[in-house]
Image: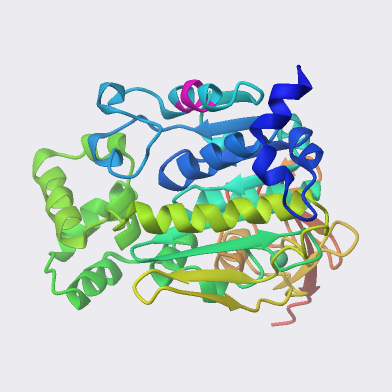
Amino acid sequence: MDAGPALTRYDRQLRLDGWEQSRLTTAKVLVAGVGALGCETAKNLALMGVGELLLVDNDNVELSNLSRQMLYVDEDIGKPKAELAQQRVSRMNPHVQVVGIQTDVRHLPVDVFSNFDVFVSCVDNWPTRRWINSMAVELGKPLVDIASDGYYGNVQSVLPRKTACIECHAEALIPTEVQAAECSLRRRKPENLVSELREKDIIVKVEEAAELFQHNIKTLYDIKYAPQKVVDGLRPELRSLVHRLRSLLNPKIPAVLSVAATVAGLGVFEVVRILHGGALGKALSGLLVYDGLNGRVSRVKLGRNPLCHVCGADSDNPTEIATDSEEKIVDLIDKISNKFMFPDVKLQKGTRLLNGDEVVKDAGLSDGDIVYVHTSRRASPMPLKVRVVENSG
Ligand SMILES: [Zn+2]
């Protein structure tokens, strides 16, 4: 690369006290999600001269994206965002190597993540945010998590095992409706769904809710976000019920570009500060909240949670779970699901998955044994130490 014109390009930022362009030029940053936040993030990182960018998204462009997502134009509707983002961002700065991959970020192999210096999460859902956070902590890579909701936006920098991770305060930060959907739904009844809807002045019959349950639509969250193929598979009356409920529950999060651009700008500067390794001040610890309506930015202190199952524990010091020798595995799984907010737990001991119908002692579990929890909310299975109390009764 011809260094002359490249450096002229960055002339104004090179004049900044403490700025070291080589910190950016040699950096590799992975951006998950190229919606409103991700477009802004990718654009900023590229224009400032971050050496390599990987842009990951599994969505296609829709008309309603065009008020916020400046990498796309009308002719792009229906086309894959990651590929378009790669083309457009590459054109903004030829000195930056940009790759776009059209996939769910959770499907990328771990080697891809290992190759990057910083991850930026710009995704719009908690399951994926939780997964990226666990990957970042596992690999010891800094993560900047950026989110927006209406007139509010927030940024959290995660320096693994140095600052709080996304999971440290999950119970306070994840909305209750999402928490309900993240827990075990095995004991949930159609009546629960009927009464939650009634609280929102929406009346549904128990029989209708029961039928939705058969299709794994068990929570308000499921009604809003059940995959299209599940909804398409419903009988026509039930499908129109879901459409009606969706329009009443209004699943689309309100969003406006100025707020997204502001928080993405704040988040990208966190990336720059992280890459400077302290030369531009310490990276943020805790949550930075932007309130667009009041024009206010505030910082919420978040200490690390020593009991956090992502960054507080590790394989030498696993989280413990109590059980008794007569407890059924399926009930132990429920307990784990509810404690950690994992909706899809499978338990592994040694090389085999435990059978839900067995009781703890017949499954060969003894006090102090390590089991591994498989869930789509984590990049790798979580080790858990079981504390087995003898059941004398
Ligand atoms: Zn944590």
Q: Quadrant of residue 371?
A: bottom right
Left/right placement of residue 180 relative to residue 334 reads left
Q: As rendered, which of 353 and 296 lies closer to the eye? A: 296
The stretch in magenta equals 85-89
Q: Quadrant of residue 106?
A: top right
Q: Is residue 388 visible?
A: yes
Left/right placement of residue 45 relative to residue 249 reads right
Q: Residue at x 57, y 65 (%)?
A: 331
Q: What colour scheme does the image use?
A: rainbow
Which residue is outermost to the right?
A: 316
Q: Is residue 344 visible?
A: no
Left/right placement of residue 351 relative to residue 211 reads right
Q: Main secondary structure of the magenta part?
A: helix
Give the x, y percent position of residue 87. Answer: 49, 20
The N terminus lies in quadrant: top right
Give the x, y percent position of residue 288. Answer: 57, 69
Name above or below for residue 330 compared with residue 139.
below
Give the x, y percent position of residue 209. Answer: 21, 59
Q: As rendered, which of 308 and 116 lies closer to the eye? A: 116
Q: Quadrant of residue 316?
A: bottom right
Name above or below for residue 389 compared with residue 11.
below
The C terminus lies in quadrant: bottom right
Q: Residue at x 53, y 44 (%)?
A: 41
Q: Residue at x 63, y 60 (%)?
A: 329
Left/right placement of residue 380 relative to residue 214 reads right
Query: Does the magenta segment cover residue 160?
Result: no
Q: As rendered, which of 258 and 174 lies closer to the eye? A: 258
